[in-house]
Amino acid sequence: MTDGEKKLRVGVILGGMSSEREVSLNSGRNVYDNLDRERFDPLPVFMDGGGRLWILPWKLVSQNTTVDIEERLEGEARRIAYDDLGEVVDFAFIALHGKYGDDGCIQGLLEILGIPYTGSGVLASAIGMDKEVQQRLLAASGIKVPVSVVVSEKEWIADEEGVAEKLASKFGFPLVTKPVREGSSVGVTIVHAFDEICEGMKAAFTWDRKVLVEEYLRGIEFSSIVIEDVDGPRPLAVTEIRPHSAFFTYDDKYMPGKCRKFTPPKSIPAEAVETIKQEVVRAYRSLGFRCYGRIDGFYLESGDVYITDPNSSSGMAPSSFFFEQAAEAGMLPSEIISRLIDIALSIHGEKRGPL
Ligand SMILES: Nc1ncnc2c1ncn2[C@@H]1O[C@H](COP(=O)(O)OP(=O)(O)OP(=O)(O)O)[C@@H](O)[C@H]1O
Ligand SMILES: [Mg+2]
């Protein structure tokens, strides 16, 4: 940047309306702290539980919870109408997660406002949130996904016992129940016996009207951040996940010191890591992700690589896969954040319409 050139005003959007708003606060403040001040003018933009936007004074960014922030909004933050966002920011770094955050909703709003933003467009973000649709698309591209069925709340309520029997005979135990559209393991249950099916279904129905019931995969779980450059999408690295709990739960994901992560993997053979790298890029392309994404899956003893959870965004706390893998690839947090913004700007420049 030369003297006199104006810095890009980057609004870091954090908080939001989803079950993952606390995760978003952690992501957003870390991005805010690490934005390169030589190139960017960062502005924290808080989305409250009702979807309203507020410009936060920087000291509120370090509050412990979104509730603590919400209590101080009226007195200390500045409410901003959607219409006016483009007057205070040139670019949106979306640090929101979950519903309304990485499912195409905020992306649609930013498209209408003409503000470039990080991550995938409207359609791919919506696909990245919907486990039913993404499994169909992945399978159509020849990518291995777990056997699954979708149960609607209507079907379930009409005949709980009958549906449970069908699920038990199709999958055996354990089986996995999850909301079709959620993240951070919210509403996910590993069901070990017939009389636990009801509890698993109900936990998932708390978050969505459709539940995905899946075969349980016995293998090593992995996660890979895929990021684009001029040559197309590439994995930053692959991380092997060794959960502390029976599976990779919300606490495992976010409580310091709970789960072990190995980047590069410890127990996955090197050739299999190469296969994983190919499969995560294939998954990324087949869902139309742009800018970056995080693709999760399992490596099975048979050598098969399954993709279970492609995400169009990823947590950005200091110990997240995103920064752990960036470090493995030799990049500081500020460098990978700058790169993401540069990629997003170049993608935005090529767009014809909102996709
Ligand atoms: N088919 C499966 N077999 C075995 N374990 C599974 C299966 N599906 C999910 N799990 C476990 O449950 C966790 C959460 O499931 P999943 O990744 O589908 O949910 P998510 O809420 O979208 O997570 P994320 O925060 O990564 O977006 C996984 O990390 C894994 O440990
Ligand atoms: Mg997910």
Image: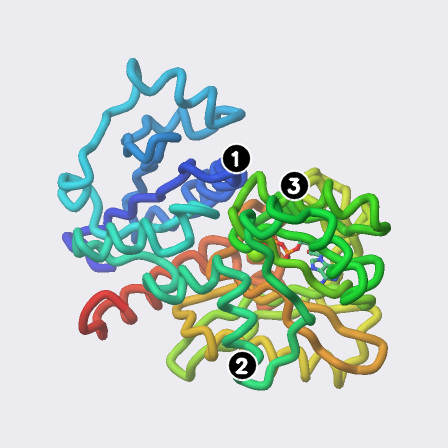
Looking at the rendered structure, the secondary structure element under dot 1 is helix
| Colour scheme employed for the rendering of this structure | rainbow
- Identity of the amino acid at label 2? Arg
Q: Are marks 2 and 1 in contact (CB under 8 Å)?
A: no
The C terminus - image quarter:
bottom left
Please name the residue shown 29% across and 48% down the image.
10
Asked whether, in this view, residue 183 is left or right of residue 276, the answer is left
The numbered disc on residue 285 is none
Asked whether, in this view, residue 5 is left or right of residue 108, the answer is left
C-alpha distance separating marks 3 and 1: 23 Å
The N terminus - image quarter:
bottom left
Residue beneath disc 1: 22
Residue beneath disc 2: 282
Q: Position of residue 37 (x, y in %)?
A: 34, 46
- Name the front one of labels 3 and 1: 3
C-alpha distance separating marks 3 and 2: 34 Å
* Mark 1 nearby-residue class (10 Å; few <14, some 14–19, many ≥20): some
Q: Are marks 3 and 1 in contact (CB under 8 Å)?
A: no
**Taking the image as four quarters, which one is ligand 1 found in?**
bottom right
Which sits earlier in the primary sequence, circle 3 or circle 2? 3
* Mark 2 nearby-residue class (10 Å; few <14, some 14–19, many ≥20): some
Q: Is residue 241 above or below residue 145?
A: above
Nearest the camera: 85 or 318?
85
Asked whether, in this view, residue 336 is left or right of residue 54, the answer is right
- Identity of the amino acid at label 1? Glu
C-alpha distance separating marks 2 and 1: 31 Å
Q: Quadrant of residue 45?
A: top left
Residue beneath disc 3: 202
Looking at the rendered structure, the secondary structure element under dot 3 is helix
- Identity of the amino acid at label 3? Lys
* Mark 3 nearby-residue class (10 Å; few <14, some 14–19, many ≥20): some
